[in-house]
Amino acid sequence: MFKKQSPTRSLAFKRTVKIIFCFTIAILAIPLTGLIGELSTDYQQEWAKIELGTTSESNQSDLLNDPKSLFKKAYYYFQKSSLTGSLRDMEKASVAFDKALADLPLSTDLYLLHTAFNLKLHRLEAAKADLEKLSFMDEDPKVQVLKADIAVQEGNYNAAATSYRNIIEKNRNWDNLSRLAYLQAKFGDYDSAEQLYQEAEEEISAKEMRSYAWVELQRGYLALTRGQHASAWDHYQRADQAYSGYWLTKAYMAEWLGAQRNYDAAIVLYKQIIVCSQRPDLYHALGDLYLYMGKPELAKPWHNKALGVYLDSARRGDIQYYHHLASFYADARLDGAEAVKWARKDIQLRQNVATRDALAWALFRDGQYPAAVDEMKKALAVNWQDAHLFFHAAMIHLAAGLTEEGKVYFQKAVDINPYYNAFHVHR
């Protein structure tokens, strides 16, 4: 005989049922609090705890319009969207934030959280507007790091790196160290980046194993982009051992398998992740893998699914998929005109190496070779050390008749990663 469930727990359980297949749990009906201990992976357990908190605070805020509950509801949905990467969870977080911001007096924690949320979705102007509300906190490291994050997205890398170093002196934690490590790697200082990532891991407590796994994934991806495939896999395995069942780890592993031409295993892993996450970038990645395998007929349905979500999001006024649309039309559809259209939309919002590279590549696909060269020169001026950037530069310069420059950039790509032409995911 099952105990009668409270309304909160009943709702939580109904939501849990939707992902029963993903979690492969054979249960009929138990309270979510009882379920948490039975879930087999770290990811499942964290998801269940956040889901319970989300449901509880949702009921409290909806019924009582309680200020604390409104904040907690936004917080839990932010945490859930960060964990799952789900577009639906991001939309729910956005709604929760809108409600909290409209009904609550100025809350520093709420605006800090909302700034971070806006940055995840590339809403730089909205993020800046949030920080304007916190101008009295300009010297606070939490505000300063968000301003540095904005500087990164806007392509002001040297200023951001200087800010991160200053912030670390005041607030030395794993995520600030990781931010600086990312920039050091992109500037080609791989030893410094690796040292910073190691120091970041030393700052992580035993209660933050998802954070530890994330840092291991960054170290693994750094190794992969330098052609060090065995080292990359070691880091990915450590991430999986530290925090089991994480879809993000599986996605990195699937890319690695594709790069090793272990296509069957990569496809199986991608499909397993997709069942649970339903992320359009994973549809895109699986379509790209089939295309890389020379199977466009199998790529098409996955690419169509990705494109449908990207365009629906853009029609709603969202901007986070502009970069994906630019690369999709450039490489999956070979439609230069559409690629240019979306690349220009993206670069209007943030002018960094990635957006300049995307526009240059789109112009190349559209046959506008002189314009592509001009845009690529702007991307290269930052001295970003990236094999795929140099590959694009090589192709663009060769197409424009600049043969010697093209050869130089090909060599730069090979020097960084001898396997630069292996399967990889657009990020």
Image (cartoon, grey):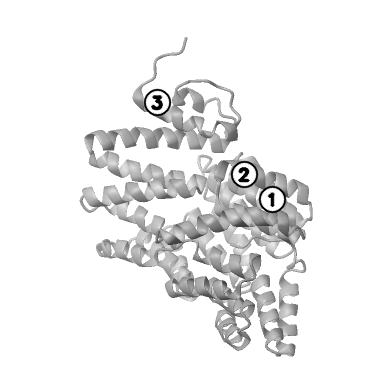
Query: How many labels were placed on the picture?
Result: 3
Gap in angstroms between the C-alphas marked 1 and 3: 35 Å
Q: Residue 166 or 234: which is nearer the viewer?
A: 234
Badge 2 marks a residue whose secondary structure is helix
The residue wearing badge 2 is: 273
Q: Is residue 10 visible?
A: yes
Residue 266 position in % (x across, y down): 72, 49
Q: Which residue is mark 3?
A: 9
Q: Quadrant of the C terminus?
A: bottom right
Dot 1: what SS?
Answer: helix
Residue 231 seen in render: no
Q: Earlier in the sequence, mark 3 or mark 2?
A: 3
Q: Position of residue 130 (x, y in %)?
A: 31, 61
| Displayed quadrant of residue 123 | bottom left
Query: Residue flagged by tag 1: what amino acid is it?
Result: Ala
Q: Earlier in the sequence, mark 1 or mark 2?
A: 1
Question: Residue drawn at (37%, 51%), measured in percent from left and top?
Answer: 94
- What type is the residue that disc 2 sits on? Ile
Residue that lies at the very extreme toward the right in this rendered image: 261
Q: Give the Cα distance between marks 3 and 2.
A: 27 Å
Give yes or no for contact between labels 1 and 2 (Cβ–Cβ under 8 Å).
yes
Q: Earlier in the sequence, mark 1 or mark 3?
A: 3
Circle 2 packing at 10 Å, graded few (<14), some (14-19), many (20+), is many
Q: Nearer the viewer, residue 353 or 62?
A: 62
Residue located at (66% from left, 76% from top):
392
Q: Which residue type does callout 3 highlight? A: Arg
Q: Is residue 321 above or below residue 105?
A: below
Left/right placement of residue 107 relative to residue 340 reads left
- What residue would you read off at disc 1? 254
Q: Does residue 264 appear left or right of residue 219 in this picture? A: right
- How many other residues sit within 10 Å of disc 1, few (<14), some (14-19) or many (≥20)? many
Q: In front here: 200 or 9?
A: 9
